[in-house]
Image (cartoon, rainbow, N blue to C red):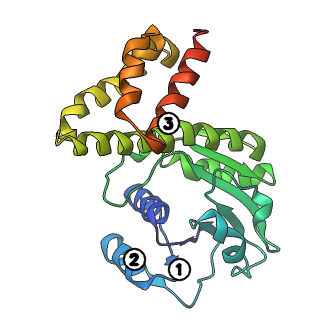
Amino acid sequence: MQIVIIGSGNVAYHLAKAFIQNNIHLKQVFGRNEKDLKEISQELNIPYSTENLADADLYIICVSDSSVENVSQLITEKNCLVAHTSGSLPKEILIGEYRKSSFYPLQTFSKSKELDYSKIPFFIEAENDEDQKILTDLASKISENVMKSDHEKRKYIHLTAVFACNFVNHLFSKAKEISDSQEIPFSYFLPLIDETVKKIHEIEPKSAQTGPAVRNDTRVLELHEQLLQDESLKIYKTMNHSIKKMYQLP
């Protein structure tokens, strides 16, 4: 099967790398950022182009959600399969006479960070059973965790991922702002962060909760609030209110 990846960002890079590592041939990586495309091409030995989209059996669109619809219109092949990699968009966002699908890898991607692709869950949606099997078989060459998922379920998968990853990472950033303001090395907090994440592999997150809010320690909560202001104070109060509500505390 002739496969083309469209895009040059984090998802495109890692998906291309996962394919190459698992002996899946890529005909081309296509996009508009020649610098990034050239780097992908040189590292993974894949032809690239910014102008001429190659003929293919499968096109995988790895661009921002806001660009998927426009990019999908570049594909003029009628007897091909096209998949986007978005967690939030329906397959119907794709504009063309081809077969439409979704090929969603559930992971946070950064080009500089190595990943174990076999552990990344893939969620597949297609218009028919044959295309579902094609994409499931393809994903199964990369990952041990492949699941069928329609758009309705995928929306909730993506929402869960935002809470579990994006929001948590933002809190890490806010925590670093506080530690930096007091000239405390943020690296001192990494064992705590690592243990927090490690613990929920063995214990339900709700059962693993610790801290002054779940203890309803008003004295500590008030002390912390005196140390914060503006946005950080709002976040602190909102998070503690949510924790108290979850545990039915006053």
Q: Residue at x 51, y 37 (%)?
A: 234
Q: Residue at x 18, y 33 (%)?
A: 188
Q: Can the viewer see residue 144? A: no
Q: Residue at x 40, y 61 (%)?
A: 17
- Residue 218 — which label? none
Q: How far across and how far down the image is residue 231, in percent? A: 48, 44
Crowd class of label 2 (few under 14; some 14 to 19; many from 20; radius 10 Å): some
Q: Quadrant of residue 179?
A: top left
Of residues 201 and 248, the one nearer the viewer is 248
* Position of residue 215 in the picture relative to residue 193 (left or right): right
What amino acid is at disc 3?
Ile
In primary-sequence order, the first of circles 3 and 1 is 1
* Position of residue 112 in the picture relative to residue 125 (left or right): left
Gap between marks 2 and 3 measured at Cα:
36 Å
In primary-sequence order, the first of circles 1 and 2 is 1
SS at mark 2 in the image: helix
Instruction: Please give the residue where the numbered disc 2 appears in the rendered image.
Output: 36
Outermost residue, front side? 226
SS at mark 3 in the image: helix
Instruction: Please give the residue where the numbered disc 1 appears in the rendered image.
Output: 31
Q: How far across and how far down the image is residue 47, in percent? A: 43, 81
Crowd class of label 1 (few under 14; some 14 to 19; many from 20; radius 10 Å): many
How many dots with numbers? 3
Gap between marks 1 and 2 measured at Cα:
9 Å
Tell me the quadrant of the picture where the N terminus can be found: bottom right
What amino acid is at disc 1?
Gly
In primary-sequence order, the first of circles 2 and 3 is 2
Instruction: Please give the residue where the numbered disc 3 appears in the rendered image.
Output: 235
Tell me the quadrant of the picture where the C terminus can be found: top right
